[in-house]
Image: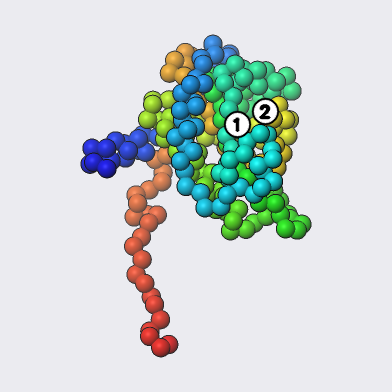
Amino acid sequence: MSTEKAAEVDQTIRARRTEKVLADEALPPVSARGVIDELVAVAGWAPFHKPAARVHLQDGGLTSIVPWRFHLLDADGCRALRQALLARGDKSKVPRMLGAASALVQATWLPNPPRGEIDGLFEATVDNMEIVAAAGAAVQNLLLAATARGIRNYWASGGALRDPDAFGWMGIPEREILLGSLFFFPADTGDAEVSGGSHRDRRGAPAEWSRWVDLRLPAPGS
């Protein structure tokens, strides 16, 4: 890779930022299906070590061995989902974001079936940890690809979009676990509120979270 190309990649990584767009009244829907398909295709090149368990290959018609799934909703779908959440009294920021979004991607990861009784959503194993890491890499690829195209994006924890009702409305298999609800917003957001993340400038310098290791190996024969 040339120095110029590397600098472009570095700049895209630095430019990625949280941008929530909150609309009290729904904005006119702007179709983004084509560009979202482009982003998803690029994101799929994330590394993964563990293929999805076979049980997941029977769900929802998606048969890839990658241990994540992206469930895509266009602008019209976002507006319909907004209405469904408002109708049941949701007062969170999620309906406001759905009212502004040109697309929503529900990013899930595919846990291995537990080998016995578990306490929580999934069995705490190294394999599952690697699956989450791979899905996170795919999400970051998606966000960086959006940033490179000048598309505002936000990785949300999901809120009501984690609920079984929301999974049912979107046809997401129950055994999948939501890693994040990814919102993508149009360039023209009118009078909608735009806010950034609260931790972006608090991460510290690299020397605060990285270090070169001095090995402390045992002496030969010890």
Residue found at x 47% / y 37%: 43
| Mark 2, residue position | 170
Q: For residue 219, which quarter of the picture?
A: bottom left
Residue 62: percent from left, percent from top = 63, 36
Q: Residue at x 49, y 32 (%)?
A: 40
Q: Does residue 216 appear to the left or right of 26 in the view shown?
A: left
Task: Describe the colour scheme in one phrase.
Answer: rainbow
Quadrant placement of the N terminus: top left
Label 1 and label 2: CA atoms lie apart by 8 Å
In the figure, 174 relative to 73: above or below?
below
Q: Which mark is residue 71?
A: 1
Residue 3: give x, y in percent of width and height: 22, 41
Count of marks placed on residues:
2
* Residue 26 visible here: yes
Residue lying at the far bottom in this picture: please name it.
221
Name the residue located 36 percent from the left edge and 66 percent from the top edge: 213
Residue 60 is drawn in which quadrant? top right
Q: Are marks 1 and 2 in contact (CB under 8 Å)?
A: yes
What kind of residue is marked 1? Answer: His
- Locate residue 116 relative to residue 98 in the image: left or right: right
Q: In the rendering, at what x and y percent does residue 22 appear?
A: 54, 22
Q: Amino acid at mark 2?
A: Met
- Left or right, 147 with respect to 166, comes to left
**Residue found at the far left of this picture:** 3
Residue placed at 46% from the left, 28% from the top?
Answer: 38
Q: Residues within 10 Å of mark 2 (few under 14, many from 20)?
A: some
